[in-house]
Image (tube, rainbow, N blue to C red):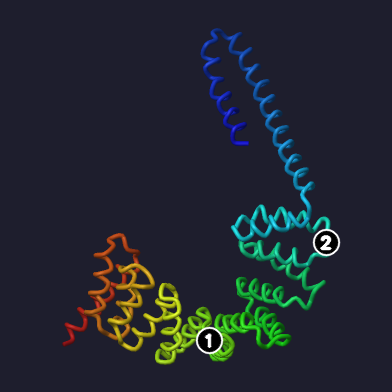
Amino acid sequence: MKTHRFLLLLSLLALPMLVTSCGGKQSTVKMRKELMQRDAALATADAEWEKKQARAAQAGQHDIPLPRLEAMGEMALQSRDYETAMMNFIEILKHQPGRQDIRYKIGVIFFLTGQFELAQKQFALVLMQAPEMLQAHEALGMVHLEQKKYPLAIEEFQRVLHQDPRRTKARHLLGIAYLEAGQTQRAISELTRALALEPGNVNSLTTLGQAYLKKNDYTRALAPLKKAQALAPQDAKANRLLGMALAGLKRYPEALEAFMKAGDEAQAYNNLGVYFFRDGQYEEAAKCFQRALDLRSTFYQEAKANLQRALEKLRLAQKDS
């Protein structure tokens, strides 16, 4: 394909040289006519070549046994080659329309590529034929989460847990759905249950810490976040949330250390400055914001705005004293 288009480009680039070598009105008109005919011939040849390629690909796919197509689709899915995976799975469905497991994978590809409406349709079709397929209910719930349809997401995860109360993934997702819906205490309850089933689940630990942070309960947030960091020292979310909990408890040096593990140094100082500002320590806040800007002069506008606010608060405080 690329070679063909490259040769076509070379032939088109050569045409202006032919035009400039001809003189006179009659020669120019004749040459224009020849150019138009040549362009039309090239376009036709290009279209025919595309058709041949499509037919060859289709014929080749038809000749591949279905188990081989499925294996190729799985490998493509694992390597995030979603287009190839989709092509293979669709071909399987043409021959085996009852394969709900394959339709589920097509829905997963739509979900991973951000096509949530199409994913929802595929998962709904799966559940019409296989309502007992719990992973399809979970996937449909995740689509609803992405669409911010929290009551529908909660309903799907509850349906799964009604069938299998020990399904950790569904319990974790239900906790997230409650948290996003603003039902923080329910989120804490579900995430605690999820951790009783799987104590070392880093995602559940960090989400539980996040739920406590929403309630400004920094002390209770600390334990799950410290455990998450111990299990996954490089996890950016765990370190960022841990920094927030430590800063909320006014343990600023430890908070800075956690923030630094979550991102770059400039971001860490900006985050710490926010907590100094909230605590009324405007001089320390200004130092942090200035440090962030010194580390990265092109730091985003938020740090500059934060510095200006801190300096203004500091000026007013000095004026009143």
Placement of the N terminus among the 4 image quadrants: top right
Q: Position of residue 50 (x, y in %)?
A: 70, 36
Q: Tell which circle, 1 or 2, labels the residue nearer the N-terminal end.
A: 2
| Disc 1 crowd, CA 10 A, few/some/many (<14, 14-19, 20+) | some
Task: Quadrant for residue 124, please give it.
Answer: bottom right
Say what amino acid the circle numbered 1 marks: Pro
Name which residue lies at 40% across and 77% down.
239
**Percent position of residue 23, x then y:** 54, 8
Q: Which mark is residue 162?
A: none
Side (left or right) of 84 relative to 261: right
> Percent from the top left, x then y, of residue 298?
31, 60
Alpha-carbon distance for marks 1 and 2? 41 Å
Say which element carries label 2.
loop
Residue 317 screen position, x and y as percent = 21, 84
Q: Which residue is mark 1?
A: 199
- In the rendering, which numbered label is found on residue 97? 2
- Residue at horizontal 72%, vertical 78%? 134
Residue at 61 percent of width and 55 percent of height: 81
SS assignment at label 1: loop
| Residue 250, picture quadrant | bottom left
> Is 146 drawn above or below residue 167 in the view shown?
above
Q: In which quadrant will I find the C terminus? A: bottom left
